[in-house]
Image: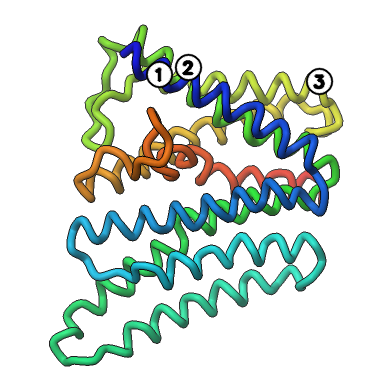
Amino acid sequence: MKSAIKHRIVTVAVTLPLFFILVFLLPHFNHLSLNIVALSASILGALEVASFFRKREIPVSRLLFPLLSATLPIVAYLEIAGVVQPAFSSFWLMTLFILVLIRGVLVKKEKDLADVLQLISSSLLVIIYPALFISYIVRLSGFENSSIIILFFLSLPIANDILAYLAGMFLGGSTRLKLPVSPNKSIVGFIAGFLSSIGVALLFNYFFPTLLLGKTSYAVLLGAVIGLLTILGDLAESALKRSAGVKDSGKLIPGRGGMLDSVDSWLLSAPVFYYFFKMIYG
């Protein structure tokens, strides 16, 4: 337990200053530095998803579609930079789907046809998860006051993760839900994480009243929705790992595991957070 907490503390101590530098000291060119990090996370995450399928001996592209998945955050960045039209991302996503289907057609032997359904399914997931979700984090760079909005988004899942972990570890022993996808998750941890997201949203609404148009109801609604999606994002990645028979998605970050283990709680939240601000800003 002490070792796990130590790794968490070190990770937070390194991550928070890094995000501060990327968001506030290097905001140039629509947060290009931060978006390069997002691009790297997309590639590494897609490679980890591909490894899940290989663990189960399910056919999957080892390199092609993980690399193609990285084009989704790239296209998102080109959109906010004004290089391509906003509709281009939909066109490009459809193009990637077509490429996956074409890959399924190009089998060399008749016996390989039995694997086409699995190949197409695995390739689609590698493209979408996590790159499509991360592309919405990239899109946050296109908002006015983007630095504050990005900080707001990053703070929600980080606070959720930390409070849920601490509450679950020290107070949640008797409230373990014993979910098949994540047996150690507890009701206490879920509640602590959920409430922390609402609390963070209220704090941002207080210190930056124009951010959510000064409406407390918006802060509570956004915090509650993101709090729930943060939890579900973590559970979704846990389900993928357990299906693959692995504890961690990789060994990239000591004490955390792979890239997916570090960004899983952000993924489902990112599109909802983006569209929330898109709607209130018109």
Query: Amino acid type of disc 2?
Result: Ala
Query: Amino acid type of disc 1?
Result: Gly
Q: Quadrant of residue 78?
A: bottom right
Q: Residues within 10 Å of mark 1 (few under 14, many from 20)?
A: many
Q: Residue at x 77, y 24 (%)?
A: 205
Q: Residue at x 47, y 61 (%)?
A: 128
**Which numbered tag is attached to residue 189?**
1
Q: Considering the numbered disc 3 on the image, is that residue within a helix, a strand or a loop?
A: helix
**Which numbered tag is attached to residue 103?**
none
Left or right of 123 in this view: 217 = right
Q: Considering the numbered disc 2 on the image, is that residue within a helix, a strand or a loop?
A: helix
Callout 1–callout 2 Cβ contact below 8 Å: yes
| Residue extending farthest left | 111
Query: Amino acid type of disc 3?
Result: Phe
Residue 142: % across, % down: 78, 52
Q: Residues within 10 Å of mark 2 (few under 14, many from 20)?
A: many
On screen, 171 above or below 26?
above
Q: Residue at x 33, y 60 (%)?
A: 50
Q: Residues within 10 Å of mark 3 (few under 14, many from 20)?
A: few
Q: Which residue is mark 2?
A: 192
Q: Residue at x 62, y 27 (%)?
A: 16
Q: Considering the numbered disc 1 on the image, is that residue within a helix, a strand or a loop?
A: helix
Alpha-carbon span between mark 1 and mark 2: 5 Å
Q: Quadrant of residue 54?
A: bottom left
Q: Which residue is mark 3?
A: 207
Name the image quarter holding the N terminus. Answer: top left
| Residue extending farthest top | 171
